[in-house]
Image (cartoon, rainbow, N blue to C red):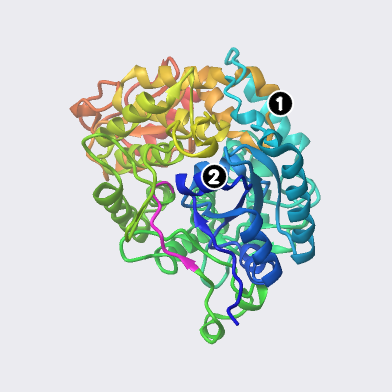
Amino acid sequence: MTETRVEWREWGPEAFAAAAETDRPVLLSLTATWCADCHEMEAKTYAEPRIAANVNDGFVPVRVDVDRNPRVRERYNMGGFPSTVFLAPDGTLLTGAGYLDPEGMRQVLDSVREMYAEKGADAGRVPRALAGDLPPAGEVTEAIEEHLVGQLDVKFDEEHAGWGDDAKFPLPRTVEFALKRDRDRALRTLDAVRNHLTDEVAGGFFRYAGGRDWTDVHYEKPLDTNAAVLRAFANAYLYTGEEAYREPAAGAVSFLTDDLWTGVGVGGSLGPGMGRAYYARSAGDRADLDAPREDLTVYAGGNALAADAMLAFHAYTDDERAGEYAERILGVLRRDLIDAETGAVTRFRAGDAVGETDLLEDAARVVAALVRAESVLGEGADLARTVADRAIERLHDGGSFVDGPREGEALLDRPFRPVDGNVEMAETLLDLSLVTGEERYEAVARETAAAFAGASDRFGVQVAGYGSLVGRLTRGSTLVAVGTEPGSDLHRAALRVADHEKVVVPNAHRGAGPLDVEEGAAVVRVGDRTADPATTPDELMARVADVIA
């Protein structure tokens, strides 16, 4: 007897056409390679023959990998993965849930079938975030940064560190915001991440802890998490010079360039495998166990974030491995995922599968990595301009950025304006304006910040990066223009100025950046205050102290 299985379809017009033609709801399953609960639900719930038959008969089942399809993820995520989402044939939302065991799935299937039989497609709704309304704009003032600094205090867990009183995520961008404004809490949080979410054998960081006290660790190791937390630890080392922050960053470099290295770039994730039973073992003992699932897809945004983080770590420590692999990653991005003529960024290429182009997250991270490359290596600004210009042309609309092209099935044609994605792009445009001297990029960054200012009183620590952006726009950014080639003692000293939000421009004696600098000198500018030129690392540090004081 043939076993009944769910007849999954790919996301696309054919699936929604079939739903409309047969007047059936769509069952959308959002999954990820690294997600243990996703694989468990597949094995325990969807593998149950009666449930599979029920799904096939009454619904059009569609499965989506959320890493490969971030626009679908953002529109239909039910708060985590797996997400079990029911849609009308036009893609509007009927209802949804997370993980469902067989009994829970039976109940939900019956409930959705009854609701759809009674109301049909009229039961579908468009989530408020996709309604098309522009975010509430306002004035960009210092009060926004002050509010978010206050949130660092109000939401901090004084007993266990980290922010919030439930599950603990590393929140690397929040940590980076706090490093300049509430350093003690930032370092205490990184200490907790190091003590609870670090793989002490292979390096790298686990995604989060389910318990307030950093227990119930979820052992998946996604690229994005590891790259962002690596950068946060590198920036902590910049401020402190302590090995306690350098070592976890170095371990993450090793993990990304060993365990997740595909031969050309960094893969997307490593799954949790057997969880603690695997990760508590030594390297030798792990070799005797089944290895965790790997997603070796080379994603543009994740690899750009990794290159950015590795270049930062290399700049602060002279770590050769980090610098070498950052350049290799930038090479594969340029070769395979960035069109140098048009600036189009393709999310991934894997065999015959090709990802979407012109996604905000990917473009922002690619521009950030190229700007970092300009600061550290002396090259990258030209391509950064090309990518940024395309993103502004295609995605900047109504004062802010949408997350991708306004086209596609179901709700993909609805504009979605993610705060975090807008902040990431605006910050990197601000950096680009400093390395190129082109004020038009700062103008877009300022307009983007203002587009969300009317809602800033409702922002919490999860979007604390908005405070960094606003702080730089209101007080001015720190710029260090160096009149030498990259790699000189003066340039290396500039990179190690203890301000991770600064921008360093080498080759300023050749016209790079907005400041005229004589060969062999460096000039520091903060906002409208410019220090006298420095010609030695010690003089540079003294000038930094003068202009910031």
Q: Label 2's element?
A: helix
List x then y, in percent, for residue 66. Answer: 53, 51
Front-lying residue, 1 or 445: 1
Query: Which disc is residue 433 wearing?
Result: none
| Residue underneath mark 1 | 458
Which callout, 1 or 2, points to the residue nearer the camera?
Answer: 2
Q: Is 33 on the left or on the right of 459, as rendered?
A: left
- Secondary structure at badge 1 equals helix
Marks 1 and 2, how far apart at CA? 43 Å
Q: Quadrant of the N terminus?
A: bottom right
Q: Nearer the viewer, residue 245 or 263?
A: 263
Instruction: Answer few, some or many: residues within 10 Å of disc 1's Cα (few below 14, many 20 plus, some between 14 and 19).
Output: few
Residue 135, position in %: x, y? 60, 21
**Residue at left offset 44%, top offset 27%:** 478
**Left or right: 419 as drawn, with respect to 69:** right
- Mark 1 vs 2, N-terminal side: 2
Residue type highlighted by circle 2: Glu
Q: State yes or no: residue 277 in magenta.
A: no
Image height check: is 203 above or below 475? Answer: below
Q: Nearer the viewer, residue 466 or 34?
A: 34
From which residue to which does the magenta span run? 294-301
Q: Which residue is mark 2?
A: 21
Q: Is residue 469 above or below residue 295?
A: above
Front one among 461 and 103 = 103
Q: Quadrant of residue 38?
A: bottom right
| CB atoms of marks 1 and 2 within 8 Å | no
Q: Residue type at mark 1: give it.
A: Arg
Is any atom of residue 173 visible in this view?
Answer: no
Query: Does 324 sit left or right of 161 as displayed?
Result: left
Q: Residue at x 68, y 49 (%)?
A: 188
